[in-house]
Amino acid sequence: LVTRGLAETSRLGVALGARASTFMGLSGLGDLMLTCSGDLSRNRQVGLRLGSGESLEDIASSMCMVAEGVKTTAAVHDLARRLGVDTPVTDAVQGLLHGGESPRKAVMRLMTRTLRQE
């Protein structure tokens, strides 16, 4: 899932004019790894709590700080659609946060996708 996220981020960045190699450094892979594994990551905490069955509304109201991914997912999703970039991870997060999709269904949809070059 993390490598798919990196591939997706790179695709979107390249579509916006960035170099793919940029995403292999601290601001790409480094940030992604910290977001996915760091206990202080607000986005990760939201994901863990959603996965345990809490509602987004309850999570947001109990947090003192902003988990930027909650607000930016819709914008990234819309941008990717306008650019014609395939973003399955973003699509799954969008469905989970704003489309009523369950965490289990979102993960199953992501992890059972047809394998392709990434």
Image (spheres, grey):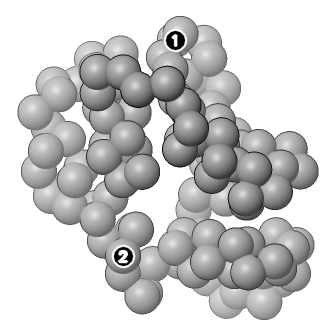
Question: Residue 66 location in percent, x, y?
Answer: 62, 74
Question: Residue 39 location in percent, x, y?
Answer: 42, 88
- For label 2, count other residues whose C-alpha is less than 10 Å away and answer few (under 14), some (14-19) or many (20+): few
Task: Give above or below for 26 relative to 53.
Answer: above
Q: Residue at x 36, y 81 (%)?
A: 38
In the image: residue 48, left or right of residue 114: right
Which quarter of the figure has residue 46? bottom right
Tell me the residue that label 2 is attached to.
37
Question: Residue 81 location in percent, x, y?
Answer: 62, 17
Tell me the residue that label 1 is attached to.
83
Q: Quadrant of the C terminus?
A: top left
Which quarter of the figure has residue 74? top right
Q: Rounded to the nearest whole Å, what is the CA distance between mark 1 and mark 2?
A: 30 Å
Give the amino acid at mark 2. Ser
Q: Residue at x 86, y 73 (%)?
A: 55
Q: Residue at x 29, y 65 (%)?
A: 33
In the image: residue 112, left or right of residue 24: right
Tag shown at residue 105: none
Q: At numbered mark 1, what does the secondary structure look like: helix, strand or loop?
A: helix
How many numbered circles does the render carry? 2
Decide which of 102, 33 is in the foreground and name it: 102
Task: Give above or below for 77 relative to 38.
Answer: above
Q: Residue at x 89, y 50 (%)?
A: 100
In the image: residue 19, left or right of residue 16: left
Q: State whether residue 48 appears in this view.
A: yes
Q: State whether residue 46 appears in this view.
A: no
Which quarter of the figure has residue 68? bottom right
